[in-house]
Amino acid sequence: MAEIVSAREIAQLRRDRENLRDAALVMARFATDSGVRTDLDQAMEFFNLNRAELEAENAREADPENS
């Protein structure tokens, strides 16, 4: 069975689908969020990373002479 749907209706259905996906994501985040936050320095320490080393590495990669 087929149904003819106008371009306007298709566009509205797509917007509704996107809105529903966003709402589901927000609801999932609310349901699973413990409220605990980790700052960047704590995360870096956990993964044994050093801010100065990362900044130096980023600077080297961003330098056009190293390309």
Image: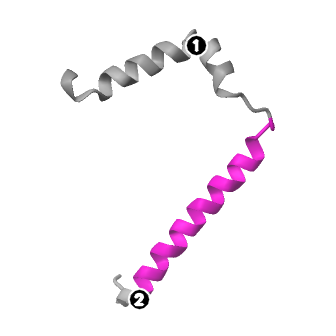
Q: Which residue is mark 1?
A: 47
Quick one: label 1, few (<14), some, or many (20+) residues within 10 Å? Answer: few
- Start-end of magenta stretch: 9-35
The quarter of the rendered structure image containing the N terminus is bottom left
Q: Is residue 47 left or right of residue 29?
A: left
Q: Amino acid at mark 2?
A: Arg
The residue at 56%/61% (across/down) is 21
Which of labels 1 and 2 is toward the front?
Answer: 1
Q: Secondary structure at mark 1?
A: loop
> Which residue is tagged 2?
8
Choose between 16 and 4: the one closer to the eye: 16
Residue 8 appears in the rendering: yes
- In the displayed structure, 34 sits above or below 7; it is above
Q: Residues within 10 Å of mark 2 (few under 14, many from 20)?
A: few
In the displayed structure, 28 sits above or below 61; it is: below
Q: Amino acid at mark 1?
A: Phe
As drawn, 23 above or below 8 = above
Q: Nearer the viewer, residue 3 or 26?
A: 26
Magenta residue check for 34: yes
Name which residue lies at 81% across and 38% down: 35
